[in-house]
Image: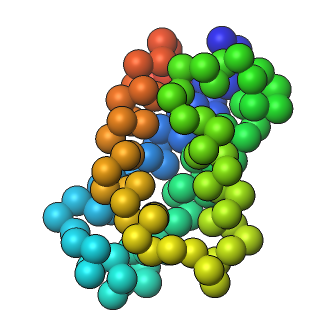
Amino acid sequence: MDNNSLKHFYDALSAARAIQKFITDKTFEDYLDDDLLSSGVERKFEIIGEAFNRICKDSPNDLNVITNYRGIIDFRNVVAPAYDHLEDTLVWGLASNQIHQLITELEAIEDIELL
């Protein structure tokens, strides 16, 4: 794996960890009521998707270590332009139910923490 991919994977890992930190001890109602929280989670999902998109353009085989990288990129492509049609339940569900798996997959990438 080249250093550019590692850098983008690290960026995605940092963003995923931030989402996990943001939502710790929060409920869906907290998410709905807190514009700063929801904006932060959405922005971090954009970063993850864009990081994977860049890897996909330069070294697509590197993404094979991520179970649903295509879905993550596609989600980023929805979050960015569809700010006014975004389903809060979808964002919250991904943040609360699936971010942990993504973090686990990213942490398993050799040398990711060395950047």
User: Outermost residue toward the left?
Assistant: 25
Name the residue rendered at 22%, 69% in the picture: 26
Q: Residue 76 location, x and y as percent?
A: 65, 56
Please say whether residue 8 is visible from this viewpoint: yes
Position of residue 15 relative to residue 111, above or below, is: below
The N terminus, quarter of image: top right
Report whether 4 appears left or right of 27. right
Name the residue rendered at 77%, 21% in the picture: 59
Position of residue 109 relative to residue 48, above or below, is: above
Closer to the camera in the image, 2 or 25: 25
Q: Residue 31 location, x and y as percent?
A: 34, 76
Position of residue 64 relative to residue 20, above or below, is: above
Report whether 60 appears left or right of 114. right
Name the residue rendered at 60%, 44% in the picture: 71
Please say whether residue 3 is visible from this viewpoint: no
User: Outermost residue toward the right?
Assistant: 57
